[in-house]
Image (spheres, rainbow, N blue to C red):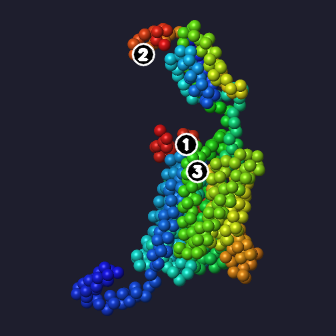
Amino acid sequence: MKLIMAIIKPFKLDDVREALSSVGVAGMTVSEVKGFGRQKGQTEIYRGAEYSTNMVPKIKVEVVCDDDLAPRVVEVVQQAANSGAIGDGKIFVLDVAQAVRIRTGETGETAL
Amino acid sequence: MTISKKLCGTAAALGAALSASVPVWAQEAAATAAAPVPNPGNNAWMMTSTLLVFLMILPGLALFYGGLTRSKNMLSTMTQIGAAASLAMLIWVVWGYGTAFGPEGNSFLAWGKYFLSGITPDSTAATFTDEVISEYVFVCFQMTFSAITIALVIGAVVERMKFSALMVFTPIWLTIVYYPIAHMVWAGGGLFFEMGALDFAGGTVVHINAGVSALVACLILGKRIGYPKEPMPPHSLTLTMVGTGLLWVGWFGFNAGSALEANGSAALAMINTFVATAAAALAWMVVEKLAGHKPSALGFCSGVIAGLVAVTPAAGNSGPFGAIVLGAVASIICFIAVSKLKPMFGYDDSLDAFGIHGVGGIVGAIGTGIVYAPGLGGPGGADFVVGSQVVTQILAVVTTIIWSSIGTAVAIYVAKALTGLRVSPDVEREGLDLGEHGERAYN
């Protein structure tokens, strides 16, 4: 099993969710996060006092799927989240040791 | 009319039957008949104005200032405003009214009428014409002015001053600073009043006074921990915008109410409070743009307040176009004060009480001496001389600055001796909401 973690631009969330549904991903976890990479933050000015915030708001999407589906998931997320501009985000793929469905106690890929 | 006559008749009959005091009763009745009776229209307008000024404090100023602080100090800011204003109201009826507007007095102070002694529903206060208004209404109207002035001072000391220190500072400051200056400006026989200084709605008493006191208070209190290195952005400009709107609306009571009647002078003050403020709001945003920034929401709000402050002394003392120029000029000077002067000197006037109320008040007070001229559309007579009036205005401004600086220093040091003045660094970092009040604004 793989954990696919995608940090994307907030306005790309709907596109990514639709793309994931189209390849058969049935569930995901979404969180609002802040951070920075190559895209630096913006400057805020309040009555002349300048604050440069280097943290940019992003959305983190986490999906766990079986090993076979993982390359396809990465591909559709990359396409859906791409706007061609700096700050589009990153995708990380991690190995998952175990998964448990809390209600039934099922484990492994059947728990997904 | 019928009912009151009937009641009077009954009372008279009763009095006569019980103590045979008919002659005394008759004498009183004759005196009452001769006394001036307030016009209900004027009374109604002054009651409305009083409530509008109160609206400026709660929730107007509380939201305006609250939105500008960090979220951990939201309740502390609003509570300090509410509590200081409440204390000011109580002190006003005990000795404040007597000290500012009492029947006896000299150039600096008045006395008498403590605990509102002698004031009844039939008592009247003079206006600027032959009309009168109910004295209780006048007491209430002036009470809200003293309450908002102390609340304005809080803008410079938020996020670090102890609640208890403010509660000690408030009565001392009102007594030695506010009441004497209110007397000097507005009471017959007062120093500035006799000098002929023009101050329609309290530019010197309220704004220069509050602004300068705020500066002195924040200099003695010291900077917030982390200022100016840590970012301290406003936590809710939405609430600040709501507060700005309430302040602008309430300010019509403040300015047009200062005519003390629902007359043409109030009407002039009303239109000036619209147009000077609108000009100032736009001027601030234009200057932001020229300075290379974006025209901002906070810029709009700051411009509104700067314009309102500047037009306060000029409200009934200027034509609408003089007021527009005054508002715009004050806005530009206040912009420079808060965005250039403050960083240059490095004082932590947290919410710019001095930068906007002090500086805007000074520009407004001096400018009033210019826009009063009939040649500029002002209501001054044909014999009005700008030069000598401006000198009088400057004298009043300088006297106010000196008086409020010294008085504030005294009041702050007394508060420091009794309470310690500042919260501990731990409380300051955690926020005054939890540390001083045991609550959070947002859960």
Q: Is residue B40 visible?
A: yes
Q: Quadrant of residue B363?
A: bottom right
The foreground one among B429 and B256 is: B256
Nearer the observer, B340 or B173: B340
Q: Amino acid at mark 1?
A: Ser
Q: Earlier in the sequence, mark 3 or mark 1?
A: 1
Rendering coords of residue B116 (x, y %): 44, 73
Q: Secondary structure at mark 2?
A: loop
Residue farthest to the bottom, as pictured: B23
In the depicted structure, whether residue B357 falls above or below residue B4: above
The amino acid marked with disc number 3 is Met
Q: CA distance from mark 3 to mark 1?
A: 16 Å
Which chain is home to disc 1?
Answer: B
Residue extending furthest toward the front? A22
Q: In which chain is the residue bearing label 2? A: A
Same-chain check, marks 3 and 1: yes
Residue pointed to by mark 2: A102
Q: Secondary structure at mark 3?
A: helix
- Above or below B100: residue B57: above
Task: Determine whether the residue tagged by mark 1 lies in a helix, strand or loop.
Answer: helix
Q: CA distance from mark 1 to mark 2?
A: 38 Å
Could you tell me if residue B182 is visible in this image? Answer: no
In this rendering, which labeled residue sits more in front, label 3 or label 1? Answer: 3
Asked whether the residues under the numbered discs 3 and 2 touch, taking CB atoms below 8 Å apart as contact, a structural biologist would say no
Residue at the image point whose x is 49% and y is 51% from the top: B79
Up-down: is B235 above or below B210? above
What residue is shown with label 3? B241
Across and down, in percent, residue B89 comes to: 47, 64
